[in-house]
Amino acid sequence: MIKLRDVTKVFPAVAGKGAQPTGAQVVALDGINLSVGEGRIHGIVGRSGAGKSTLIRCLTGLEKPTSGEVWIGDTQISALDGAKLRAARRSIGFVFQHANLLDSRTAAENIAHPLDIIGVKGEEKRRRVAELVELVGLSGRENNYPAQLSGGQIQRVGIARALAASPDVLLCDEPTSALDPSTTRQILSLIRSLRDKLGITVLLITHEMSVVREICDEVTLLAEGKILQSGDLLQVATDTRGPLYAELIPLPPPPTGLNAVMVNCDYGDSPTISTSEDLVRLAAEYEAHATIVAGTIETLGGRQVGRVQLALRNYNNEPISREGFNRFLRQLEESGVVAKEAAFL
Ligand SMILES: Nc1ncnc2c1ncn2[C@@H]1O[C@H](COP(=O)(O)OP(=O)(O)OP(=O)(O)O)[C@@H](O)[C@H]1O
Ligand SMILES: [Mg+2]
């Protein structure tokens, strides 16, 4: 379990080189309350400078919050220093964008590194490393040096190393940003399978919404050190008025020059419209022939969430009348679909 209680982190503003300190401050985190349950995968997103890395650094104990509490399990990380903090950090695994392996050591030796530090030796160490190699899918590559591994394999070594001391929590800062899309999917599926097998709690920073869609159970949007939105993935992806909606379900630009009435429909929240076909069927009740001309349809947690743009024509292939259109719009709204007129000819 991860918990932040009223966490604020203030830095002195960094003046230009050689300049006098100005006394100005940067509020990197501003009253953050967040709780991530055991075995959940929680994504943190937000623009550059939003406070994502500062949040993770507070969780690792590398930074101390200016005020508030940071808990990992039963340990208040923000209250520890020195040897106690070092000991507590062993129950946290870290995965970064670059694994920074030791080049002169093999994959297995890199994975064993944290075990060396905590004094695990001999047969026990050998067994644990073999287990980890298998767990992250590196069997047959354990004796390769980093220079003989692909980017995805290097990240697997990094993940195995993070898991060596059997942490309860895995903190990942942009773990796939340096990888190509297919390797990214493999690493994300590895992280999910580790959660499933080990019940580990994962906090993952990313700037890619595709990563959030693919593995996160829940997501938090940070902006200027504050939480703008936080919740279960399906809940935020269906909150058509929330700030994450347009990012999770982006609408591609529609075609232009169509001789039709255009309407944008967000049907994430609707209790009755659950597929784009339902919209087409509803339009037919208003004597409108609806064609989906642009759309983003995502299946999240087994449910279809969509934004589509419909071109509406009557059965003579002409744009539908204003009156018919207005009636259809009212019906959409009653059905819980957020509809916006895009073009009326
Ligand atoms: N050590 C520091 N001293 C002064 N200001 C800092 C320090 N660390 C971070 N900041 C400031 O705090 C704010 C949040 O920074 P942070 O690195 O957490 O952002 P981020 O969301 O991780 O951004 P990015 O996506 O670019 O990595 C920024 O305004 C940054 O300049
Ligand atoms: Mg950062």
Image (cartoon, rainbow, N blue to C red):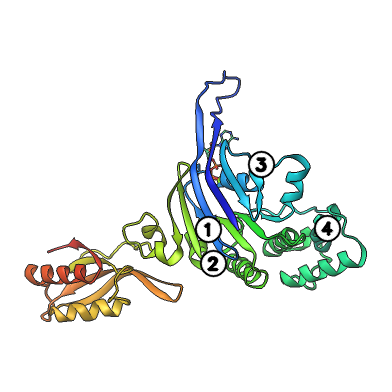
Q: Who comes first in sequence, dot 3 or dot 1?
A: 1
Q: Can you say whether 220 is above or below 287 in the image?
A: above
For residue 215, the mark is 2
For residue 79, the mark is 3
**Label 4: element kind:** helix
Q: Who comes first in sequence, dot 3 or dot 2?
A: 3
Cβ atoms under marks 1 and 4 closer than 8 Å:
no
Q: Who comes first in sequence, dot 1 or dot 4?
A: 1
Cβ atoms under marks 2 and 1 closer than 8 Å:
yes
**Gap between marks 2 and 4 measured at Cα:** 29 Å
Amino acid at dot 2: Ile
**Label 3: element kind:** helix
Residue situated in front as seen by the camera: 72 or 287: 72
For the N terminus, the image quarter is: bottom right
For residue 126, the mark is none
For residue 43, the mark is 1
